[in-house]
Image (cartoon, grey):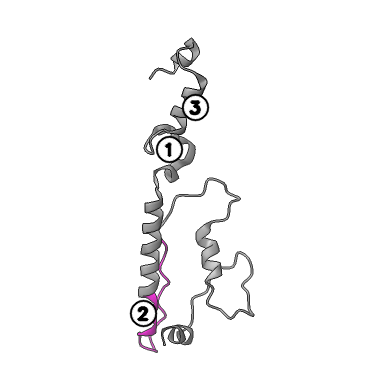
Amino acid sequence: MDLLDWHRGRLSSRRLTVLVKHLPRDSATLYELHGEAARWSATDYLLASAVDQLAEANWMFATVNRDEDSDPLEYPKPVPRPAAEDPDAEDPDLSEDASRSTGPASEPSPPGAPARNPGRAELAQFFS
């Protein structure tokens, strides 16, 4: 496909638009426009979420079953995902974490505050 055909009148604007809209996921144009997010499919995001959930479940299990005198375990870091296209857009992972807050409902955390790890008693109550 030669883009000069559009200038020569051999390629309609509508056909060019359809071709650009349906570029393959690994095209250089989509990568330039959207960065690494262009290469992530819904399956990739679901797999990253599943890995995060498994790591969190393992962390909860290990925290509940650890020795009382030992140091608290570090909360697992989520799988890195491509940056959002719009910097003003809300990250769905952050909003999900905020809705899963383990603290009492009467004590909402301030916006932008880091999520706190649940205590041993809260985890024991969850698993009992």
Q: Earlier in the sequence, mark 3 or mark 1?
A: 3
Q: Is residue 49 above or below residue 42?
A: below
Numbered label attached to residue 61: 2
As drawn, 13 above or below 78: above
Mark 3 Cα shell of 10 Å, populated few (<14), some (14-19), many (≥20): few
Classify 28 as above or below 114.
above
The residue that disc 3 covers is: 17
Camera-near label (2 vs 3) is 3
Closer to the camera in the image, 11 or 81 = 11
Name the image quarter holding the C terminus.
bottom left
Distance, label 2 to label 3, CA atoms, is 52 Å
Which residue appears at 35% of the width and 74% of the height? 58
Total numbered badges shown on the rendered structure = 3
Whether residue 52 is in magenta: the answer is: no
Sequence-first tag of 2 and 3: 3
Along the line of sight, the residue nearer the viewer: 98 or 68: 98
Seen at 45% across and 83% down, the residue is 126
Identify the main secondary structure in magenta: loop
Locate the N terminus by quadrant: top left
Give the image location of residue 27, x and y in percent.
38, 34
| Residue at which label 1 appears | 31
